[in-house]
Amino acid sequence: PNEIRSAAAVAIGSFKDESNISLLEQILQNPGEAKEIRMYSAYGIGRTSSPKAFDILSPYIENEKEDLNIRLWALSGLSFVKDEKAYKKIIDFSKVDNVRIRLEAVKSLGNFDKKPDIVEILKYKATHDPEFAVKKEAKKVLQKMGINLEEKTNTSSTAPSKTNESKTTEQKK
């Protein structure tokens, strides 16, 4: 029965009907409810794409005492809210200490348009995050956006890169 209720929570959110948010929020707020159903309710709230989802999900993601899986699914759900507040909050979460939260935040940024501040944080994460999995995911998201890090570093406008690029071109001839 939990699998069916969990799937129903996601499906309800997928209808993108704001009137369903209160039902999903009641489930999410009920600590006596099964964790899986609360996780998928959080995700379903985000799937509505309603701006209301931001105010409901953010406190769950920020609450370090909340179950990590609920936090992760709430963060993933937040990526369906296509406004500046949502993606800026997700950028903030990409900078936290918890590796799984950072990883989910980087993954979630891939659901947004290619905005300069998103690309900037993803490039930073791809090259400087201490966790290999986060670096790998950031590179994957950048590639999905049509940005190849290796290509970008070779075509940089700095003199040394151009010199290296022209040497490489000459060697190929």
Image (cartoon, grey):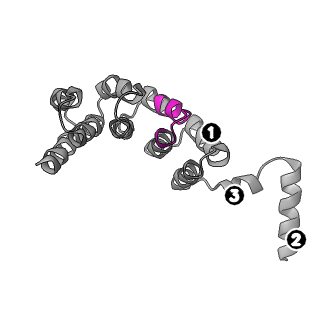
Q: Picture quarter containing residue 61?
A: top left
The image shows residue 80, relative to residue 53, as above or below, that is below
* Residue annotated with mark 1: 120
How far across and how far down the image is residue 119, in percent?
A: 59, 42
Verify CB contact (< 8 Å) between mark 1 and mark 3. no
Q: Secondary structure at mark 2?
A: helix
N-terminal-most mark, 2 or 1:
1
- Which residue is depicted at the point 35% across and 30% down? 66
Badge 3 crowding class, 10 Å Cα cut-off, few under 14, some 14 to 19, many 20 or more, is: few
Q: Return the residue at label 2.
A: 170
Judged from the image, the secondary structure of the residue bearing numbered disc 3 is helix
Q: How many C-alpha atoms fall within 10 Å of the one at disc 2: few (<14), some, or many (≥20)?
A: few
Q: Position of residue 84 (x, y in %)?
A: 46, 28
- Left or right of 133 in this view: 85: left
Is the Cβ of the residue at disc 2 closer than 8 Å to that at disc 3? no
Question: Which of marks 3 and 1 precedes in the sequence?
Answer: 1
| Residue 140 placement: quadrant | bottom right
The residue that disc 3 covers is: 150
On the rendered structure, is 80 left or right of 90?
left
Using the image, tell me which numbered label, if any, was put on residue 56: none
User: Residue 26 location in percent, x, y?
Assistant: 17, 27
Q: Which residues are magenta?
A: 89-101
